[in-house]
Image (spheres, rainbow, N blue to C red):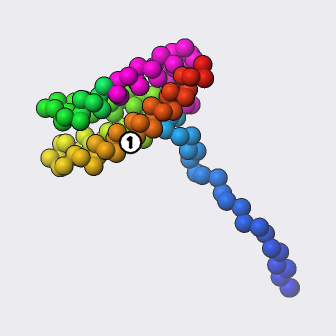
Amino acid sequence: MPLHLQRIDWMPSPPLAPDDGPLDLEHLRRMTLGDAGLEHEVLAMFSAQTASLIGALAAMPADAGALVHTLKGSARAIGAFAVADAAARLEAAIHNGDDPAEALAGLAAAVAEARSAIDAILRRS
């Protein structure tokens, strides 16, 4: 039985997990029970908190591990998983006595991206 070959144009597959940017907005909605006002309040508090914490962490105070742990938990709560992952890397570097400079730079970049997304969300409302 002869085979019939047919040309099929290549088409990219969708990602396995959607990349919605620095915030998982569905997670945020679940955590705030769909209350848009609460979402905005939580995002504004997170943005202010991250600015303060990143500033404090630049000096690597004695309580840096606790500060990073706080930031990691807050980030997970609102769906800023890239920030949480970066905070976990910095937390590990501090715990292991490694040079935290690279991990701190990664955290600062993740925070900047999340804050930019938060600012855009807050401006829309």
Q: Check disc 1 and report the residue beneath it.
A: 109
- Quadrant housing the N terminus: bottom right
Dot 1, how many residues are within 10 Å of its Cα: few (below 14), some (14-19), or many (20+)? some
Left or right, residue 12 beside residue 47: right
Left or right, residue 71 beside residue 23: left
Residue 32 belongs to the span the image colors magenta = yes
Image position, residue 87 (x, y; %): 32, 39
Which residues fall within the magenta stretch?
25-51
The reply to whether residue 63 is visible in this rendering is yes
| Vertical comparison of 12 with 67: above or below | below
Q: Which residue is drawn at 60% across and 19% down?
A: 125
Residue 41 belongs to the span the image colors magenta = yes
Image position, residue 64 (x, y; %): 20, 33
Left or right, residue 12 beside residue 51: right
Q: Residue 111 is drawn in which quadrant?
A: top left
Which residue occupies the foreground of this view, 4 or 9? 9
The reply to whether residue 30 is visible in this rendering is no
The dominant secondary structure in magenta is: helix
Q: Which residue is drawn at 49% across and 38% down?
A: 22
Image position, residue 52 (x, y; %): 31, 25
Which residue occupies the foreground of this view, 79 or 53? 53
